[in-house]
Amino acid sequence: MAKRLVILGSTGSIGTQSLDVAEQRGYTVNALAAHSNVGLLEEQIRRFRPAMAALYDEAAARDLRDRVRDLDIQVLSGMEGLCTLAELPGTDVVLNAVVGMVGLLPTLHALRAGHDVALANKETLVAGGELVMCAAREHHARLLPVDSEHSAIFQCLQGTKAGAWAPPAPSKDLGLSRVILTASGGPFFGKTAEELRQVTLQDALRHPNWSMGPKITVDSATMMNKGLELIEAKWLFDIAPENIDIVVHRESILHSLIEFTDNSVLAQLGVPDMRIPIQYALTWPLRGDPPVHRLDLAEIGRLTFYKPDHEAFPAIELCRVAIEKGGAYPAAVNAANEAANLLFREGKIPFYAISELVADTLSRTLPAVSAVEDILAVDEDCRQRIVG
Ligand code: NDP
Ligand code: MG
């Protein structure tokens, strides 16, 4: 079926790969959005001819409007622009590939419009998991995981008695007893806490297996990415955090596993290329032609597995504490991490300070949260405390 897509964050690593998949599959692109990359968004508009586009940055949006004056397209800006695109009528799937908590409101708008959301933007679920799952349930929309680990779990769950299953449908009848997320370990695998005091931004940006945007690449180096994914998995698959384990798997071939009540385990494998999970989120419950080459296990030879080193990489346990505390804590941890991650990329703090700043946030007393406005307020407050 030729689907009609809205892609938020189309100029990023996931966004550009999503457009490649869309082109290969002959999908219609209704709308595209990004932050400020006018040049690339203009190219994408000329290639896919969407009816609408948005740039978060007002000045960049004005520039884009000027550049595409010859086309029949409406260009919006700001958060309002993103949310308008997210609820665009005549859309089958909104693919949210923006980076950061800024993706939360557009996700909610898409779900409330009854659109399925293919979700790469994990910060959305970390900060507002409960609200997002409720919105999906209430508006009969689905959350189709794009993150490779969550796609792996999603794919494994299709073989269960529930048939074609997707969040937010309840997972309690699936016989699931544990989820095991794999982590590559990032560029600093094997380093001690002492050695991590010396690492540079350049070192952190050298991921062994994946080419991704800068924020998630640094999150992989601190292992915060896996902590965020633990929270993401809790919400998507309705599984208690104590039943989510993490194993380091250096080769990034086995993308995650699920264990059933009888201790039988299923895993999903494939070459490390995001076009597989992106395409699956778009073709589900069916499968498409191969977007990547075949997996050759004999060529790879060995798959290795290790326990995570929580002393050198405290981020996973910090996220575990945050989700156990619940309430505003996951949003606070996410906000602190976004702010600290950026400060590190700007050369203003050392690598090890990222986890320290996140830990400080956890020791604060935070207000209760119920509405999205409460979450946005906690987010803003936690960022301000770090940025100063
Ligand atoms: P990139 O940094 O490569 O791209 C980010 C995209 O978001 C860009 O299109 C950027 O626009 C856009 N963006 C940033 N801020 C805003 C804003 N305020 N409003 C609108 N658009 C905005 O990131 P990735 O593609 O690597 O990651 C995107 C998301 O997917 C993240 O949540 C990440 O954790 C997740 N993810 C990524 C994976 C990967 O392999 N890259 C794997 C699994 C998950 P502009 O170019 O104009 O700045
Ligand atoms: Mg992942």
Image (cartoon, grey):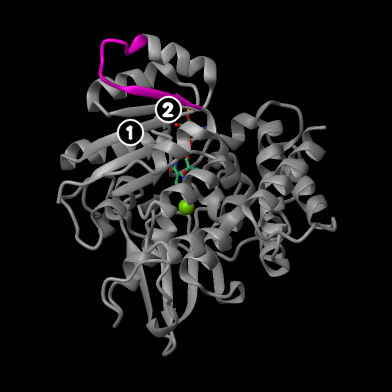
Indicate the position of residue 23 as horizontal and vertical percent values: 20, 36
Residue 368 as seen in the image, left or right of residue 90: right
Query: With respect to residue 137, does 197 lie above or below?
Result: above
Q: Residue at x 70, y 38 (%)?
A: 339
Q: Residue at x 71, y 56 (%)?
A: 314
Indicate the position of residue 375 as horizontal and vertical percent values: 67, 51
- Judging by the rendered image, the residue that carries numbered circle 1 is 31
Residue 12 as seen in the image, left or right of residue 242: left
Q: In the rendered structure, are the residues bearing label 2 and label 1 in contact, judged by CB atoms less than 8 Å apart? A: yes
Q: Amino acid at mark 2?
A: Ala
Q: Secondary structure at mark 2?
A: strand
Which corner quadrant of the image does residue 10 belong to? Answer: top left
Whether disc 2's CB lies below 8 Å from ligand 1 is answered: yes
Q: Residues within 10 Å of mark 1 (few under 14, many from 20)?
A: many
Residue 207 or residue 42, whichever sits in front: 42
Name the N-terminal-most of marks 2 and 1: 1
Indicate the position of residue 188 as horizontal and vertical percent values: 61, 46
Residue 273 seen from this side:
no
- The image quadrant where one finds the C terminus is top right
| Residues shaded magenta | 67-77
Residue 288 as seen in the image, left or right of residue 344: left
Q: Secondary structure at mark 1?
A: strand
Which corner quadrant of the image does residue 383 belong to? Answer: top right
Residue 331 highlighted magenta (yes or no): no
Indicate the position of residue 33 as horizontal and vertical percent values: 41, 31
- Judging by the rendered image, the residue that carries numbered circle 2 is 54
Residue 73 or residue 159, whichever sits in front: 73
Residue 42 or residue 151, whichever sits in front: 42
Query: With respect to residue 260, does 107 lie above or below?
Result: above
Q: Amino acid at mark 1?
A: Ala
